[in-house]
Amino acid sequence: MLLEVLTPERKLYAGEVYGVQLPGIDGSFEILDKHAPLIAALGNGKMKVLKDKTHAEFFTISGGFVEVLRNKATVLVEGAVAVGK
């Protein structure tokens, strides 16, 4: 699926991924390829971008929303910083 991570200042990430793990306001959840349409509010925490089944990138995000539609996940956050594992 296609993943885009956007902040008010810039596009932080764009590319094909296996899935993404996000900090929802009621707990963490995961979106994988071909997920059903969804809109969810995000809290502060760690976002894990699953590039494939063995490689991942991590970001610390602060609040926002995610929309999943037609195998594209768009993550809109107030701020995000790439971090190690």
Image: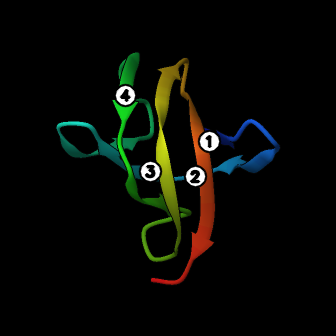
Vertical placement of residue 36 versus 74, above or below: above
Quickly name the residue at label 3: 20
Label pair 2/1, CB-CB below 8 angstroms: yes
Q: Earlier in the sequence, mark 3 or mark 4?
A: 3
Mark 2 and mark 4: Cα distance apart in space: 21 Å
Instruction: Indicate the position of residue 41 as horizontal and vertical percent values.
Output: 37, 28
Q: Amino acid at mark 4?
A: Ala
Residue appearing at x 49%, y 34% in the figure: 64
Between residues 38 and 51, which one lies in front from this camera angle?
Answer: 38
Q: Earlier in the sequence, mark 4 or mark 1?
A: 1
Tell me if mark 2 has few (under 14), some (14-19) or many (20+) residues whose alpha carbon lies within 10 angstroms of its own: many
Q: Residue at x 56, y 76 (%)?
A: 83
Give the left or right position of residue 20, taking residue 40 as reference: right
Q: Nearer the viewer, mark 3 or mark 4?
A: 4
Residue, x 62% and y 70% (percent of image)? 82
Q: Secondary structure at mark 1?
A: strand
